[in-house]
Image: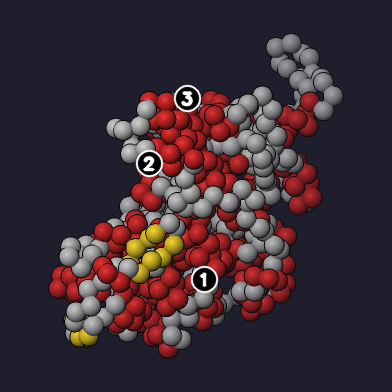
Amino acid sequence: MLNPALALALLVTTPVLAQEPAPAELTFDLRAAEHLFNRAGFGARALDLELAVAQGLEATIDGLFLPVEQRLPRERPERLTRKDGAKSDALEALRLAGGKDEAPQDMVDAADSAGRKMRREDRRQLEDYTIWWFDTMASGADPLRDRMTLFWHGYFTSSMDDVKSSYQMIEQNQFLRAEALGSFRDLLHGAAKDPAMLEYLDNDENKKQEPNENFAREVMELFTLGEGNYTEDDIKEAARAFTGWRSRKGAFDNRAAAHDTGKKTVLGVTGKHDGDDVLEILLDQEACALHVAGKLLSYFEGRSPAPERLASYAADLRASDYELEPLLRRLFADPEFYGDRVVGQRVAGPIDYLVGMSVRLDLTPPQAWYLSGSRLLGQRLFHPPTVKGWDGGMAWITTASLMQRGNLAGILVGTVDAGEVLSDQDEMFSGEEMMDDMEAMGSMDELPARPTKGVKFGALSGLKAMSGKWEPDLDLRGLLRRSGATTSEERVDFLADLLLAVELSPKTRAFLLQEFEASRPTQGRDEATGRARFRERGGFQRAQEDHLRGFAHLVLSLPEAQLN
């Protein structure tokens, strides 16, 4: 595998933003189709790309916006039943008895046991849902909705670490999914009243006697205007308007007794504003459309747009009353979106990297590979690190993360055993969480290639459970045979095109060709013994497949493999 320190140096010194001008016209070829599916989804299989090119750009874009009911139905996990605020009999009995200080010890012990069980069930419920989400991303059944759900998940951010309710986190995600391609106005109003959001940003503590400014500050800074487009007085006045909005038993509750009914002045507008009034004032600012359009363009293109281009997209967003579909349609048909400064010039986040690999190779890895792999690489769904979500870009890349990306690629293609990778990772997790995860996983004696029930992977121990039990259904020999590639040069080019979203530089291609030739098995005789090297039945074919998998592992460890 490529040395991670060298790979990091190469990636850092590779010009991520090329300086060539954007094309005046757009040719929708395989390269453009792959780029569209990488950014508007999570990659595509070769046949899907060929179909897209045959259909043309307009029809392919139309397909991304198909109504939900016309897509392959993918229902949520059946276990999604626990409601927020539900208490066990043991916990309720302890409460009625006056708490731990007043209740007998056996009642306290029963309540502690019930609490641990509820926390385990809560984690397992969120894990079930996360597995479902990974499955939808990898299936490509609704790629743009999945992509936008992930975007909004990092935009309207909440974390299970603070909310501590899988029910609320899942309900928030379902709201973001339902509205992902609709109206930003609806998204903003819904997210601002979302129970998980209100709890995460402390608006449960925002009362007229003691206003809490945290929620109002983040609504302005992160959701609508961006820094520099409001004052501290605007935050204080807006906080008064949001008093009384709270989460109660997993639902939005507007507590009138806690609301400040006095006059407030927000961004020069005076009135007896409530929270909805403030949100409309924010939406009416030009800075809001600039902020939202800028976030969308930067996310999809991996670079900040030029001021003139941003202003044009923001004007369109305002003209459509914040409907998202017109902006996205324009972007996906924009020649600049397919220019050399954009295509293959964005560092792939962990989820993009993992899902993209499995889609390109048409593999369905065990749940543990997605769950634990994304956690290991720093993008654990429902656990963003800060209120700003994930930084993205070069923040994803360190020497350690490059090595782990290569390891995970090796696990996927079957050249690395999962048990060899994570021996020193367990200290990342608390003792109680690890015990709960191990108990949730149960017996690991039999691990199917794609477990869906009964085997759960909450921590990195899930990857260890794959040790010796995952063999990818991968036939690279067959792919090469069907491609018609016969020379080493043709085979290297075919595999690089299959596995990478970027074109190889001459230097990297020469390096890969040298490595391919140096490790290629030959069906001759061992010079030391004079015996045939591959005497067993099918031995040479197995050696060829192992060679190709090792080469695929090398390609997926390159700096170019971290870009899409």
Disc number lying in front (1 or 3): 1
- Residue 13 visible in this rendered orientation of the protein: no
Disc 1 to disc 3, C-alpha distance: 42 Å
Disc number lying in front (3 or 2): 2
Residue sitting nearer the eye, 390 or 58: 390
**Crowding at label 2, few (<14), some or many (≥20) Cα neighbours within 10 Å?**
some
Q: Amino acid at mark 3?
A: Ser
**Crowding at label 3, few (<14), some or many (≥20) Cα neighbours within 10 Å?**
few
Report which residue position mark 2 lands on: 95
Label number found at residue 179: 1
Q: Amino acid at mark 2?
A: Arg
Query: What kind of element bears circle 2?
Result: helix
Classify residue 393 by image quadrant.
Answer: bottom left
In-image side of 161 versus 549 (left or right): left
Q: Is residue 33 above or below residue 78?
A: below
Query: What kind of element bears circle 3?
Result: loop
Disc number lying in front (1 or 2): 2
- Residue 144 visible in this rendered orientation of the protein: yes
Q: Earlier in the sequence, mark 1 or mark 2?
A: 2
The residue shown at (73%, 40%) is 473
Report which residue position mark 3 lands on: 423
The residue shown at (47%, 60%) is 172
